[in-house]
Amino acid sequence: MTVKVLLADDDALVRAGLALILGGSPTIEVVGEAQNGLEAIARVRAGGVDVVLMDIRMPSMDGIAATTALMTLPAPPKVIVLTTFDADEYVVRALAAGANGFLLKDTPPGDIVDAISRVFAGEPMLSPTITAQLIRQVTDAVPDVRAGQALTRVEALTDREKEVAIAIGRGSSNAEIATSLHMSVATVKAHISHIFTKLDATNRVQVAIAMHEAELL
């Protein structure tokens, strides 16, 4: 299946570079470009967008506000935020808003194509180190009461779902979870779907944060 990608960045050169990189992949099709968050939302509403490469800092509407708005749609696209620095404080806010991961703008072409394919397939694209860093930034900035709230949500999970959620928090892919827990990838995906629903999560980072707050990581 061809993954339809929208490029949202206020820098025309960045969009042109990304279009050139993605144009060489037989599994990816660039279906549009946007100069800001408002244009990105309008293009997604028009249909036919699977993944949005979303710059964080844009005029009129930034990538965080746009991501938040996109997540309210009935069938939101996957969102990968683009940033210049991996320590950008906006990355945490974007992921908390529902983004599925992030890419540095100097990421090698092959890794960009791989990241889009993995996110479209529902796979994580954050390394365990980056995930741990993001979890610390989020949990250190919120009141302790969130720990109790997270524990209440986590208690709704079955024992098997908790095992899968903990593995997600450690940065494991679906295939790695299947191998370590001796189940099929299809079963892992089913468990993840239930976990997202029970934890009110839209991405794997939010699952990791919930497990960390519940002191299970």
Image (spheres, grey):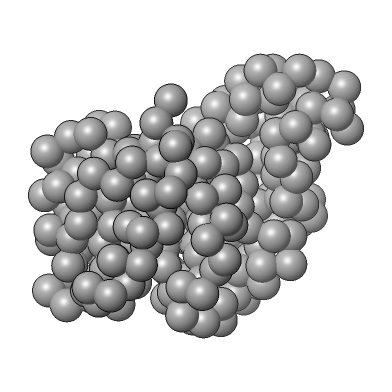
Report if residue 113 is visible in the image.
yes
Residue drawn at point x = 43 percent, y = 49 percent:
24
Establish if 4 lies above or below 116: above
| Number of numbered labels in the structure image | 0
Report if residue 144 is visible in the image.
no
List the single residue furthest toward the front. Answer: 24
For the C terminus, give its image quadrant.
Answer: bottom right
Q: Which image quarter: residue 147?
A: bottom right
User: Residue 16 in the image: x percent, y percent?
Assistant: 28, 66
Establish if 156 lies above or below 147: above
For the N terminus, give its image quadrant.
Answer: top left
Q: Nearer the viewer, residue 3 or 177?
A: 3
User: Residue 70 in the image: x percent, y percent?
Assistant: 26, 48
Residue drawn at point x = 52 percent, y = 41 percent:
117
Q: Is residue 55 left or right of residue 88?
A: left
Q: Nearer the viewer, residue 204 or 174?
A: 174
Q: Is residue 6 left or right of residue 128?
A: left
User: Residue 87 in the image: x percent, y percent?
Assistant: 56, 81
Q: Nearer the viewer, residue 159 or 6?
A: 6
Q: Is residue 55 left or right of residue 169?
A: left
Q: Which image quarter: residue 144?
A: bottom right
User: Residue 155 in the image: x percent, y percent?
Assistant: 68, 36
Residue drawn at point x = 75 percent, y = 45 percent:
172
Q: Which image quarter: residue 190?
A: top right
Residue drawn at point x = 56 percent, y = 42 percent:
118
